[in-house]
Image (cartoon, rainbow, N blue to C red):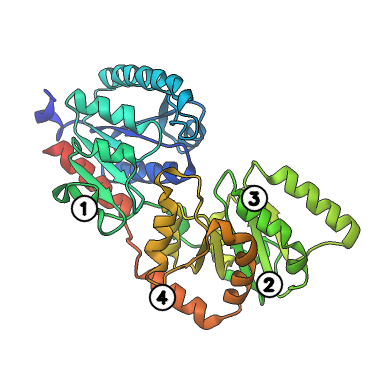
Amino acid sequence: MDNKGETTNRAPRVIISGGGTGGHIFPAVSIANAIKGLRPDAEILFVGAEGRMEMQRVPDAGYRIIGLPIAGFDRKHLWKNFAVLVKIARSQWKARSIIKEFKPDIAVGVGGFASGPTLKTASMMGIPTLLQEQNSYAGVTNKLLAKKAKKICVAYEGMEKFFPSDKIIMTGNPVRQNLLANKYTKAEALQTFGFNTNKKTILVLGGSLGARTINQTLMNAIETIKTNPDIQIIWQTGKIYIDEIRKKLEEITNSQGPIPNLFVTDFIKEMDKAYTAADLVISRAGAGSISEFCLLEKPVILVPSPNVAEDHQTKNALALSTKNAAIYVKDAEAQERLIPVAFETVKDDAKLASLQQNIAKLALPDSAKVIAQEVLKIIEC
């Protein structure tokens, strides 16, 4: 850019683009916070996808966001993608307008629908770009964007098979900073959920929207949960499934009495307490979640979603399970295996300790700060 000589003296201007799920949004906000920590004068603009959750979560975190009319490809019904191509063209046009007005020094892509048109347009306009690839298997968008990117921040080894090795920096995935400043004892955390401090506790997560297979498995296991009162379960259903699950549980409790070892909610706001309370976690295998489990040293059973691009969650789960740092249960086998494996594991202190030790070895702390330093380094070049 023409003003490159002035960038060290003036406020850095950064576009951060991506989103679609909490797994993209939380790291993006963490990177923004880390940039502000290093350069409080930095001006940061988010570019997301209209109608997606970043349009609410990013302003809640104190940042401005503009939405693009972008959508993902329908891989099952290819004939429906003409409308998607039109949206991509409109998004690139809008991204060009945003970049011309905001005049960023760099564009950072965190994955998700909006990052493609934003970073492609930024590169075409001569703006340097930095990619953050969260998964162990790179997505199509990032593989295409990598050719023009200055640096690519990754969380797994062996990413040279997707990206030029001289551009790769091993940073890990940024996580929600509030999770790392644990302010509660395990007893205090358990009391939040109305649970006994002397019993083993399993935290069941399916992401912010929910995981159908995990929820169905839990629902079908209510009798098993009732007959194992020494195991407590915190169950985050996600907002899509909560009404249906509450209705079914109400019918069960009306006819059979309460289930005191089961806490059900659609969304856990105080995740730090939930993690502190848990001896074992059951979760999908999103990259952001896995990074949290590593940093918090949480034993985990991973049930990868089969409905994601390039089946990257299975590859994420295998990256851990092959190092005995997590237990991997296939989505198709969850109904039969998940609860027996979880109950057996949570009762086995030696197994929990082994999982905890192995997952802790994979943790990469200060990821957001390392990425922020790279962002500022590129601006100053």
Q: How many marks?
A: 4
Alpha carbons under labels 2 and 3: distance apart: 18 Å
Snapshot quadrant of residue 113: top left
Task: Say what amino acid the circle numbered 1 marks.
Answer: Glu
Which of the two discs, 4 and 1, sits closer to the camera? 1
Q: Point out the tag, 2 or 3, that comes first from the N-terminus.
A: 2
Structural crowding at the residue carrying mark 4, measured as other residues with C-alpha within 10 Å and reported as few (<14), some (14–19) or many (≥20): some
x, y percent for residue 6? 12, 29
Circle 3 residue: 237
Circle 4 residue: 357
Q: Residue furthest bottom?
A: 350
Residue 147 visible within the image: yes
Structural crowding at the residue carrying mark 3, measured as other residues with C-alpha within 10 Å and reported as few (<14), some (14–19) or many (≥20): many
Task: Say what amino acid the circle numbered 2 marks.
Answer: Ile
User: On the rendered structure, is 261 left or right of 125?
Assistant: right
Q: Is residue 209 above or below residue 229?
A: above
Mark 3, secondary structure of its residue: loop
Circle 2 residue: 231
x, y percent for residue 215? 65, 53
Mark 1, secondary structure of its residue: helix
- For image coordinates 25% across by 53% down, the residue present is 159
Q: Point out the tag, 4 or 3, that comes first from the N-terminus.
A: 3
Alpha carbons under labels 4 and 3: distance apart: 28 Å
Q: Point out the tag, 2 or 4, that comes first from the N-terminus.
A: 2
Structural crowding at the residue carrying mark 1, measured as other residues with C-alpha within 10 Å and reported as few (<14), some (14–19) or many (≥20): few
The answer to whether mark 1 and mark 3 are in CB contact below 8 A is no
Structural crowding at the residue carrying mark 2, measured as other residues with C-alpha within 10 Å and reported as few (<14), some (14–19) or many (≥20): some
Q: Point out the tag, 4 or 1, that comes first from the N-terminus.
A: 1
Q: Quadrant of the C terminus?
A: top left
Residue 109 visible within the image: no
Task: Say what amino acid the circle numbered 4 marks.
Answer: Gln
Residue 160 - label: 1
